[in-house]
Structures are given as structure tokens and as C-alpha cells.
Amino acid sequence: MSTETLAQIVATVGKEIADAHRGEGKVADYIPALARVDANRFGLAVITCDGQMAEYGDAWLPFSIQSISKVFTLTMALQRMGESLWVRVGREPSGSRFNSIVQLEAEGGVPRNPFINAGAIVVTDAVLAGRTPGEAVDDIRDTLRRLAGADTIDVDKEVATSEAATGYRNYSLANFMKGFDNLHSPVEDVLQTYFHQCSLRITCRQLARAGLFLANEGVDPLTGEVVISPEHARRINAIMMTCGHYDASGEFAFQVGLPGKSGVGGGILTIVPDVAAVAVWSPGLNAVGNSQVGTLALERLAARMRWSVF
Ligand code: DON
């Protein structure tokens, strides 16, 4: 057995990957305010259930959480609605791009899973129910702040405005689902909430900390807070594994072998059940829209640590 510590392995893997691949991939530019980020950034953070922390590179620089927010809104929607959420959204991989509309008509306005945009918009509608978009966004932000133990997490207003100004596909998806009665609040309210949740800025260090409850059956191992039931935590991990990387979810399971959720900001949150949460950030994306260098780093780290669940 290796005598290297976790901190040494994270530092070694981070340096190897950064030296060989830094800057690879293409920064998302379909939201203009996202396109300005420095492609050379690379951060990696690991927090274990027994409280060890290890980091490399830009682990303390905030980036746009984007679709990784969908893990936390799914958690909140399950807290609010329980199992009845699954009437409105499925849990099958879509095999389609994240903003695809093609399956929605054939499947009666019920999205395949909570991590494609259509499904995430339904989940946001569940989080919004009974309150204003401002209240729901504050609740999402405050939930992340509490889980991360970080008051600095906040919405980047410029990104939120940019998302709304260019969100034609999201408007199509939301209107289409409203036509099937699968959105309860007004389309504009749901989408404003969705755009703001995607525009939250967070660091790798904070993201790994915020996701740690998913590595520990729904209980934050460092504070003892019961965030969600063990059954729901297991299901969220299952959906991260099968749907967390859109139509490259199979590839991520093959390469890394862990539940993970990516965002077009270049971040990925990965859960090592019973062991740790890992967050990586490198803004350049691969052809499917997942962080290219981030995926390589997770592949190398999971192999080195023998973390694959398979
Ligand atoms: O809906 C959108 O276009 C974005 N705000 C979120 C997209 C995202 O991160 C998809 N990810 N890989």
C-alpha cells in the first residue's frame, strides 16, 4: 500500500495534469459573459468524510457553477416534494445534448431526468412553488452557503442577465412544458430563478465541501446536519452517475467510475461514496460540453486512489 498522503497525491495529480494539459478545450461562449474567463485556470479540491482537505492550483478562485447547481436544486426539490417529484421528471439518461427538446413532445412534456435543462427547469419550478423568484434564489444561495460554510457564494448578476438575454432554447423548453401543464409557476419566474441559480459563483473548495453530504448518505459528516434522507442521497448519486454528464455520462462512468455533475463553467463535482467529495475546475470544454482537463484530472485521481465504484 502506498504511503503517500492524500495531499501529496492531489498535488502530484494536479501538477501532472496542469503541466500536460492546461488550457485545453474550448471555453463556453454561447453565454457572452461566460466567454471572458481565463482558459488556463485549473483548480482541484478534495474533502474527505473524516475532514481531510487537499487542494491544487486555483481551488480558491470562484467560477460559474452553471449546471452543477442542478444537484443542489434536486436536493431541495426532494426535500420539499419527496417522491412525488418523479411524476414530473424521469430518471433515465437522455442520450441527447443538455438543451435538447426532441424527446419532450413524444414523452408528454415529462423530461427524461433532472440534469438535462428541461428536467432542471421542472426541478426549479418545484423549488420555486409558493414563493417569489427572489425568495427562491435566496434560498438556493443560502443553502449552498450553509453547506459550503462560505458566505461569499453569490449570484453573478452579469451572467444571469446574459443567460436571460440569450436563453432562447430554455424559453422554448419551458413554454413547451407549460403547454403540458408540467410547470406550475409562470415561465418567466421559473426561468429567472433557473438563470440565477446557474449564475452562482463558487470555488472548488466550497463546492467539494457543499457536496460532502452526498458522500455520507445525506448527512454532512463534519457538522452532523441531516441534509436529506439516505434513500434520496443514494438516488441523487445514481442520477449523477447515469445522467450527470449529458450524452457523455457513459463515457464519464467508463473513465472515472464515480457519480459526477458537470457545468459549462468548466466545473465538475464528483462524489466518492463513503469517502470524499471532489471538485475540479478548468474552463475549456470538450465537444459534449464537459470540462476537458477536469475530466482528465478526475480520471487520473480516481485511478491513483482506486476510487472507482466498479
Ligand atoms: O441552461 C443553460 O444554458 C446554462 N445556464 C446551464 C448549462 C450547463 O451548465 C449545461 N452544462 N453542462
Image (cartoon, rainbow, N blue to C red):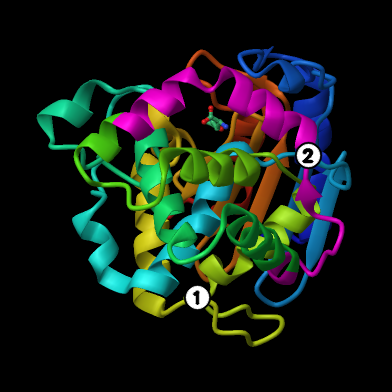
Location of residue 272 by image quarter: bottom right
Q: Is residue 216 above or below residue 224?
A: above
Mark 1: few, some, or many residues within 10 Å (few <14, many ≥20)? many
Quadrant assignment for ligand 1? top right
Q: Is residue 210 above or below residue 25?
A: below
Q: Nearer the viewer, residue 223 or 102?
A: 102
> Which residue appears at 52% of the width and 66% of the height?
214
SS of the residue under disc 1: loop
Location of residue 27 by image quarter: top right
Location of residue 5 by image quarter: bottom right
Which range of residues does the magenta coloring cover?
Answer: 146-175
Q: Amino acid at mark 1?
A: Gly
Judging by the rendered image, the residue that carries numbered circle 1 is 218
Q: Position of residue 263 (x, y in %)?
A: 58, 35
Q: Is residue 88 visible?
A: yes
Q: Is residue 277 left or right of residue 186?
A: right
Q: Is residue 153 magenta?
A: yes
| Label at residue 156 | 2
- The majority secondary structure of the magenta stretch comes to helix
SS of the residue under disc 2: loop
> Which residue appears at 53% of the width and 74% of the height?
216
Q: Position of residue 237 (x, y in %)?
A: 42, 58
Q: Nearer the viewer, residue 88 or 67?
A: 88
Sequence order check: which comes first, mark 2 or mark 1? 2
Q: Is residue 96 magenta?
A: no
Q: Nearer the viewer, residue 135 or 270?
A: 135
Q: Position of residue 189 (x, y in %)?
A: 51, 45
